[in-house]
Image (spheres, rainbow, N blue to C red):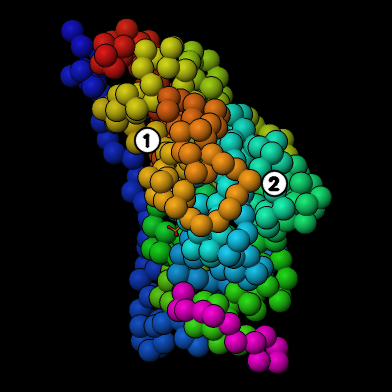
Amino acid sequence: MATLAINGGSPTRSKPYPEWPVFDQRDLDAVTDVIKSGRWGGHPYPGPQTDEFTQRFAAMQGGGHAVAMANGTITMEVALRSANIGWGDEVIVPAYTFQATAAAPMAAGALPVIADIDPQTYCIDPKSIEAKITPKTKAIIVVHLGAEMSDMDAVMEIAEKHHLIVVEDCAHAHGAKWHGRGAGTIGHFGSFSFQSSKILTTGEGGMLLCRTEELAERAISIIDCGRPHDEAGQQYTMGANYRMTELQAALGNVALERFPAQAKEREAMASYMDEALSDIPGVRVLKRDPRHTTRSFYRYILAVTPEEYGADHFTVCAAMHAEGIPCDPGNEPMHKYPLFQPGLSKLPVPSAFPEYFEFDKMHLPAAERATASEAIWLNENVFRAGPAGVDDVTNALRKIQANAAEMKKIAE
Ligand SMILES: Cc1ncc(COP(=O)(O)O)c(C=O)c1O
């Protein structure tokens, strides 16, 4: 008789996990007030809701001059353009991320140079950054992936040594802290997404934290159709309309009220999960770096050993779904991503890396292993279902592993 739900056995969990996003009367009131005010859009920048949201968001992260935008991709493009990075420049990005991180430098006109990840955290490997630096390198975009943070001590040391701009892609890292400092306030820029799956959402939206007021003025000008936003009101820029609307900012202001309690709940349940996973054969919990003082949980990423599960992460995720657990195997590696290859090879940008023009030669072993066989991204909503919700995840992983022989047959 079948044991695994994927083969017709009974699932570990039969009730759904909590929905996301959540809302209450405060969201309805906030949006209604904006509608009644007649000021729906983002012009002139900033409207009262946007002004409040930028200030409160920067205060929550603990610093930076915040600029609210349409999404968390344009934020990275604008960061690079504000720092005068563009044609002919190279920007180092990690292989393991969402395509936006590598697309942003291309939109700014720069070449994304793809670095490998640290297998312990799945975030960019500082050694790989150093290996990719050329005289054309102008910036590094690091991604704080899932629930992890990049090694910001090492990244900032490299950046200072080589005079590079650092953009932190914090699309997954609202509220996270490194040595007590907020994600996005350590590099020159911190880029946040408020897209609807994110743990702080306005439906769509983004925020750029800039290290200086001058950089923020340039960023505002770029997203406000090039209008001058410097003190003298003179600096026109090449720009377009990438402003956040007042309706989005109003939702953001309510989301900020809820966020601390949600973050606390996710963190408590994730620590409970860390413990519970520690004795499941074939499961590797990613590194818990003591410098990462506050963790945020957009996705909880763990690694499975295919040999112990009888199958790779694609089949394990399918089995987890059948068991009632929301998860996925994560993103493709950027150097194999169809958008960039062979597209990148067609860019007329001379590079020190011939493999950019011969796709098959690019080899990033840690990213390839994570994306081909081992990473499992658990949805944040498992942490909003209390200890029983977490137990269901660990029980499902245990059950699937105990039936590795059945899994092997499915994978064949
Ligand atoms: C790591 C990362 N960076 C950037 C983004 C882009 O955010 P947005 O969809 O708001 O443009 C995402 C979105 O999923 C992401 O996961």
Mark 2 is surrounded, within 10 Å at the Cα level, by few (under 14), some (14 to 19) or many (20 or more) other residues, namely many
Residue 124 at least partly seen: yes
Name the dominant secondary structure of the magenta segment. Answer: loop
Q: Nearer the viewer, residue 340 or 359?
A: 359
Q: Earlier in the sequence, mark 1 or mark 2?
A: 2
Tell me if residue 381 comes above or below residue 111 in the rendering. above
Mark 2 C-beta to ligand 1 under 8 Å: no
Q: Which residue is mark 1?
A: 328
In the rendered structure, the answer to whether residue 288 lies left or right of residue 251 reads right
Tell me if residue 357 comes above or below residue 195 in the rendering. above
Counting from the top left corner in percent of width and height, residue 55 is at 62, 72
Q: Nearer the viewer, residue 378 or 78?
A: 78
Tell me where the magenta segment starts and ends, as one range.
Answer: 230-244
Tell me if residue 181 comes above or below residue 57 in the rendering. above
Mark 1 and mark 2: span between their CA atoms?
A: 33 Å
Q: Secondary structure at mark 1?
A: strand
Q: Which residue is mark 2?
A: 133
Locate the C terminus and report the quarter of the image it occupies: top left
Residue at 54 percent across and 83 percent down: it is 226
Tell me if residue 343 comes above or below residue 255 in the rendering. above
Mark 1 C-beta to ligand 1 under 8 Å: no
Magenta stretch holds residue 67: no
Q: Nearer the viewer, residue 385 or 78?
A: 78
Mark 1 is surrounded, within 10 Å at the Cα level, by few (under 14), some (14 to 19) or many (20 or more) other residues, namely many
Counting from the top left corner in percent of width and height, residue 130 is at 71, 41
- When asked about the image quadrant of residue 317, the answer is top left
- When asked about the image quadrant of residue 60, the answer is bottom right
Residue at 52 percent across and 35 percent down: it is 362
